[in-house]
Image (cartoon, helix red, strand yellow):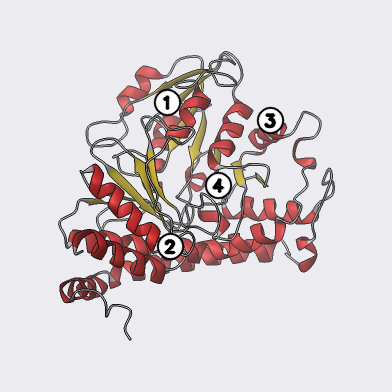
């Protein structure tokens, strides 16, 4: 029996039309995956990875050869001088906060030039929350440059906002819970060139969450000084259970390492327990897994377009991250679609998600996340804050086949039943 035999003929016809239409875009993503796989394989070979690097470490974790090899591989792939890759970095937000607190000091200012950052960072910056442990408590200033009406960076606005106290300019690559487009590496290159021309000593930081291996270049390859992300997103390859990374200039990584551990210790300690093997293998799998997820997003956009549902990026537009923004416009439809995605997940398919408070977010959030690893955004998820215009962010998918199945059946449940 065919997988689609229980779907209505009209829907099957649309799915078949979409399958044919997206073949060129899928082939492009396969070429991106091939280029990135070559980059990763070269780094593994260059650093003489061996089975001995998979040994666990405990206690202080001194002289951990596997950890050192893992971090050298990350530095090679991201074309940086140094890297921190640790299970002690519990999330992307934690990795970003560690990087920023590592290089900023009381009296310094941080300037985000890509509009309002992701919701979970607002408490770190002291914009929301009680301020405990935030930038505000440490007397670190924060400001942001609003994007232009077309979603692009306001270069004149940057010049108006930069002061003598501005030490770090930050770029968020992904849209997060925003309606703006995610920024391609080419766009980030343009931002970096502008900053270097006007502020040559400025530290440039990039939040790379959701973007790793989506293109053949990374932001650090176009001049970004410091970058961070999460291992339960792209670079974990779908098998890392926790962890984050920070890559960049050697002097900046040293400061971040001291922030993560303590002065006098820095990168020299930090037991990996049993995480080294999965972090190394996950990084090897990541180019393929990311390609599968993005191919799934292309299918999602193309199928929803058949029902005149606004979705960005459009199916035939360039991709720079995992996130597919779906504008469902009504709260009831948003919740129903999210619940349908959950029903076609491998884990907790019997559970029906409902909107609820989530730490770090201002609005209640609805989240379909039937994932093997809690909160893993490289696995297929669908979530969003319950605020008008009720946009759902569909992302991830370890295999193209799973995304195709889940989205096809979700469309059937929402629009045909």
The image shows residue 394, relative to residue 7, as above or below, that is above
Residue linked to disc 3: 259
Q: Quadrant of residue 249?
A: top right
Task: Tell us which disc is closer to us: 3 or 2.
Answer: 2
The residue lying at 57 percent from left, 42 percent from top is 91
Q: Secondary structure at mark 2?
A: loop
The residue lying at 35 percent from left, 65 percent from top is 406
Q: Are marks 1 and 2 in contact (CB under 8 Å)?
A: no
Tell me which numbered mark, 1 or 2, is placed earlier along the sequence: 1
Spatial CA span between label 2 and label 4? 22 Å
The image shows residue 103, relative to residue 27, as above or below, that is above
Residue linked to disc 1: 198
Q: Within 10 Å of the Cα at label 2, are there few (<14), some (14-19), or many (20+) other Cα atoms?
A: many
Placement of the C terminus among the 4 image quadrants: bottom left
Across and down, in percent, residue 187 comes to 36, 43
Q: Secondary structure at mark 4?
A: strand
Tell me which numbered mark, 2 or 4, is placed earlier along the sequence: 4
Task: Tell us which disc is closer to us: 1 or 4.
Answer: 4
Q: Which mark is residue 230?
A: 4
Spatial CA span between label 1 and label 4? 31 Å
Across and down, in percent, residue 218 comes to 48, 50
Tell me which numbered mark, 3 or 1, is placed earlier along the sequence: 1
Q: Quadrant of residue 316?
A: bottom left
Tell me which numbered mark, 3 or 2, is placed earlier along the sequence: 3
In the depicted view, which residue is nearer to us: 332 or 397? 332
Across and down, in percent, residue 138 comes to 59, 16
Residue linked to disc 2: 345
Spatial CA span between label 3 and label 2? 38 Å
């Amino acid at each position: 029996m065919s997988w689609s035999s229980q779907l209505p003929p009209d829907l099957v016809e649309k799915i078949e039309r979409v399958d044919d239409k997206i073949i060129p875009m899928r082939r492009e993503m396969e070429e991106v995956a091939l280029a990135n796989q070559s980059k990763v394989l070269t780094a593994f070979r260059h650093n003489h990875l061996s089975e001995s690097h998979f040994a666990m470490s405990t206690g202080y974790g001194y002289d951990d050869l596997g950890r050192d090899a893992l971090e050298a591989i990350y530095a090679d792939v991201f074309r940086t001088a140094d890297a921190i890759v640790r299970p002690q970095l519990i999330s992307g937000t934690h990795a970003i906060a560690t990087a920023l607190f590592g290089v900023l000091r009381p009296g310094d200012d941080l300037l985000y030039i890509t509009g309002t950052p992701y919701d979970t960072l607002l408490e770190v910056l002291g914009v929301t929350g009680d301020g405990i442990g935030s930038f505000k408590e440490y007397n670190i200033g924060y400001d942001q440059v609003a994007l232009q009406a077309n979603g692009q960076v306001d270069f004149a606005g940057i010049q108006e906002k930069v002061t003598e106290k501005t030490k770090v300019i930050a770029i968020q690559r992904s849209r997060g819970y925003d309606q703006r487009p995610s920024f391609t590496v080419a766009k980030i290159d343009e931002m970096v060139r502008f900053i270097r021309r006007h502020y040559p000593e400025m530290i440039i930081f990039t939040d790379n969450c959701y973007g790793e291996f989506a293109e053949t270049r990374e932001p650090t390859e176009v001049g970004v000084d410091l970058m961070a992300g999460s291992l339960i997103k792209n670079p974990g390859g779908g098998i890392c259970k926790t962890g984050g990374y920070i890559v960049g200039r050697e002097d900046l990584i040293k400061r971040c390492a001291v922030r993560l551990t303590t002065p006098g210790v820095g990168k020299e300690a930090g037991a990996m327990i049993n995480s080294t093997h999965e972090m190394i293998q996950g990084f090897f799998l990541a180019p393929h897994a990311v390609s599968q997820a993005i191919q799934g997003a292309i299918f999602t956009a193309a199928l929803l377009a058949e029902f005149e549902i606004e979705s960005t990026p459009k199916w035939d537009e360039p991709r720079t991250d995992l996130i597919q923004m779906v504008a469902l416009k009504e709260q009831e439809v948003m919740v129903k679609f999210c619940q349908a995605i959950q029903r076609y997940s491998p884990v907790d398919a019997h559970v029906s998600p409902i909107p609820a408070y989530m730490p770090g977010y201002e609005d209640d959030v609805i989240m379909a996340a039937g994932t093997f690893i809690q909160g893993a955004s490289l696995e297929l998820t669908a979530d969003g804050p319950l605020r008008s215009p009720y946009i759902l962010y569909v992302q991830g998918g370890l295999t193209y086949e799973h995304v195709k199945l889940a989205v096809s059946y979700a469309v059937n449940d929402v629009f045909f039943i």
